[in-house]
Amino acid sequence: VELQAYPTGIIPAVRIDRKLGSKMSLHLRVGYQLIDHRGLGVQDQESGSGYGFTFGLSRFFRDDFRKWHLGLRNDIWFNTIDWKNNATLLEGQTKITVVQPTAHVGYLHEVKGLWFVIPSFTIGYEVNVRTNGEPTGEGAIVLLGLQLGRWF
């Protein structure tokens, strides 16, 4: 399981990693995003949620897949945002498809042999590639994450 938090939201998810060679791993993730842009989006108030998935690669510095690793990933999100514009007194709902390429660094700490914990730091950019409704927030993103996993 994985949890990521950023200044305007939180992402709980389920993630599967698969080793590729001696130092690389591929990961797939399915998650749900809870969003509250507050006044930081295009509109005065933006909040909503959506589901999405991730495809990514990580490179570990050790052959045993422990300790530090770097990676790249891309998320695709299908979000619904309720918004309000105070100046125009308009409000509505926008459905967006978001592409979110990011880079991350993490540290795998093994716990009791079969379990591990990975804190992570991620930076990237959100791009609303499809918008059905008024424009809503997009741009740079910074996320802190925590993954709890088990070796199989």
Image: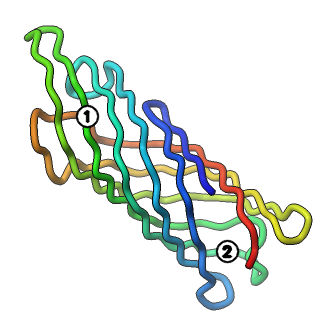
Mark 1 surroundings: few (<14), some (14-19) or many (≥20) residues within 10 A: many
Q: Quadrant of the N terminus?
A: bottom right
Q: Quadrant of residue 82?
A: top left
Report x, y in % for residue 91.
Answer: 14, 19
Separation of marks 1 and 2 at Cα, in angstroms: 37 Å
- Front residue (pair 131, 124): 131
- Which mark is drawn over residue 60? 2
- Front residue (pair 74, 63): 74
Q: Residue furthest bottom?
A: 21
100 versus 86 height, above or below: below
56 versus 136 height, above or below: below
Residue at point 27% right, 28% down? 41
Circle nearer the viewer, 1 or 2: 1
Mark 2 surroundings: few (<14), some (14-19) or many (≥20) residues within 10 A: many
Amino acid type for the residue under numbered disc 1: Ile
Residue at point 14% right, 25% down? 92
Q: Quadrant of residue 53?
A: bottom left
Secondary structure category for the residue under label 2: strand
Residue at point 23% right, 52% down? 97
Amino acid type for the residue under numbered disc 2: Phe
Q: Is residue 11 left or right of residue 22?
A: left
Report x, y in % for residue 81.
Answer: 25, 34
Q: Is residue 1 left or right of residue 89?
A: right
Q: Pointer 1: what residue?
A: 81
Q: Marks 2 and 1: in contact by CB < 8 Å?
A: no
Q: Quadrant of the C terminus?
A: bottom right
- Front residue (pair 102, 47): 47
Mark 1 or 2 closer to N-term?
2
Q: Indicate the colouring scheme.
A: rainbow
